[in-house]
Image (spheres, helix red, strand yellow):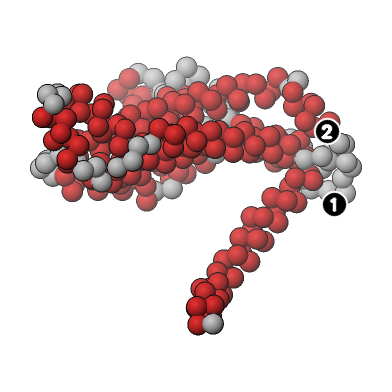
Amino acid sequence: MKRFRKEMGYFIFLIPSVILFTFCVIYPFLSGIQLAFTDWDGISRTYNFVGLDNFVRMLGDKNVLQPIKTTVIYGVGVTAANNILALFLAVTLSKKLKGKAFFKTSFFIPLAISAVLASFVWKYIDSNMLSAILGRSLLGRRETVLLGIIIISLWNNLGSNVMIYMAGIAGISRDYEEAAMIDGANTWQRFCNVTIPMLMPSFTICITLTLTSSLREFGTVLAATGGGPAGSSQTVAILIYDYMFKYSRAGYAQAISLVFMVFLVIIGLALTKFFRSKEVEA
């Protein structure tokens, strides 16, 4: 009976959070599902059910293809660059290094800055400094705009993955590396055959979260370019926003977002399953 009362006490503290989550997340999500099957314009109180018309229209909509391509390039680019750089920095900072605390803080501070503020800061740097040095604007040209946005994302989000990889490296027993050294393995062989396999749980977290979050990136792109120039940086999230608020086609926007959400869930589950299958027992 005492154990039951104790557990009920814990549950009572969860009730406010559960209620808030239900009304702020679950209810809007369930309400939004039905809107995907309507022609709602986002303003009117009335709308008509159109069945699967929005989903059928989506398959032949040429305006959706370019944002999908842009989203994939951006997501893969951010994920690859972020994790490679974060792993390199984590390995470097895990060694004896003067000023280690300073570098840790330097990489972590940008996490405290919102994506919107980071975008405005880098827009200023791009237009006033990089343009003078390079002779061109990264964010103002179709050929380089994605590179510019990727740089903003790396600066703003790199620190979290660095910390996760450093925690993973700190959890690797020295016995494995010492055994590899006795067997004659060099630094690169120890990294590939000891460090990488033991860091698989960290890869599961970092790669999965980085890819899924970058694929649904909205704030950075909207603040930095708004999808321009000429739609060259328009991602799926920006496309949904445009259909919802600019074109007053909320039902169609909801259909796109629903399909996009399913895609993200599948990607996240597939990556998690893949990396967990590669994890080894410590």
Q: Earlier in the sequence, mark 2 or mark 1?
A: 1
Residue at the image position 77 percent from the left and 30 percent from the top = 55
Q: Is residue 236 visible?
A: yes
In the image, residue 170 above or below residue 256:
below
Element on which disc 1 rests: loop
* Residue 133 shown left or right of residue 99 in the figure: right
Q: Quick one: which residue is furthest to the bottom in this view?
A: 2
Residue 279: percent from left, percent from top: 38, 36
* Residue 2 shown left or right of residue 186 in the figure: right
Density class for disc 1 (Cα within 10 Å; few <14, some 14-19, many ≥20) is few
In the image, residue 103 above or below residue 27:
above
Residue at the image position 74 percent from the left and 27 percent from the top = 58
Residue 52, numbered circle:
2
**Closest to the observer, 138 or 243:** 243
Residue at the image position 75 percent from the left and 51 percent from the top = 31
Please state which amino acid type lies under the numbered disc 1.
Arg
- Label count reads 2
**Closest to the observer, 128 or 186:** 186
Element on which disc 2 rests: loop
Density class for disc 2 (Cα within 10 Å; few <14, some 14-19, many ≥20) is few
The residue tagged 1 is: 45
Residue 275: percent from left, percent from top: 43, 34
**Closest to the observer, 193 or 212:** 193
Q: Nearer the viewer, mark 2 or mark 1?
A: 2
Please state which amino acid type lies under the numbered disc 2.
Leu
Residue 251: percent from left, percent from top: 78, 40
Quarter assignment of residue 95:
top left
| Quadrant housing the C terminus | top left
| Quadrant housing the N terminus | bottom right
Tell me how far mark 2 sits from mark 1, CA to CA. Answer: 21 Å
